[in-house]
Amino acid sequence: MSVTLRAAAPSDAAAIHSLVAANIEGGHLLPRSIEDIRDHVGRFFVAERAGQVVGCAELARLSSTVAEVRSLVVDESLRGQRIGTRLVAHLASNATTAGYSTLCAFTHAPGHFVRLGFTIVPHIWMPEKIAHDCNGCALFRR
């Protein structure tokens, strides 16, 4: 059965929240409230299979030139089928169209992103991310 990618709709917020919440314990994602996801659902893209949301990723603006891949997750039962790779490529294409010159991702598992052409750089090279999100996060520097 094929998987299609599309812009998220407000009705997808609960499914996105469920995917994110199911992957917090593993330490791969930061918690997101349902309200936060509802507020930013327009920045998400979803992977859909048989009418079910099975993956998601957010293209989050950090500055006029920098965007971040955020909350990238694929249902555990469908991992290894390149759905995450397709989502990142879709976000990268949208980032380029929107005029961003830099696309970043903050992760504890950089190998996936390196295989997709990202480069590992020190956090201090991304002051937009630090100022926008990290300084207020209880997990910063931990």
Image: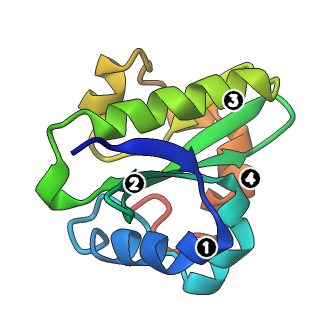
Image mark for residue 48: 2
Marks 1 and 4, the one that precedes in the sequence: 1
Asked if the residue under mark 1 is in contact with the one under mark 3, i.e. CB atoms within 8 Å, the reply is no
> Is 20 left or right of 9, judged from the image as shown?
left
Marks 4 and 2, the one that precedes in the sequence: 2
Number of numbered discs: 4
Where disc 3 sits, the SS reads helix
- Cα–Cα span, label 3 and label 4: 20 Å
- Cα–Cα span, label 3 and label 2: 21 Å
**Residue occupying the far right of the picture:** 64
Report which residue position mark 1 lands on: 37
Within the image, what quadrant is residue 86 found in? top left
Callout 2, which amino acid? Glu
Report which residue position mark 3 lands on: 95
In this rendering, the answer to whether 55 lies above or below 25 is above
Foreground disc of the pair 3, 4: 3
Callout 3, which amino acid? Ala
Which residue occupies the foreground of this view, 49 or 108? 49
Asked if the residue under mark 4 is in contact with the one under mark 3, i.e. CB atoms within 8 Å, the reply is no
Foreground disc of the pair 4, 2: 2
Report which residue position mark 4 lands on: 131
In this rendering, the answer to whether 68 lies above or below 11 is above
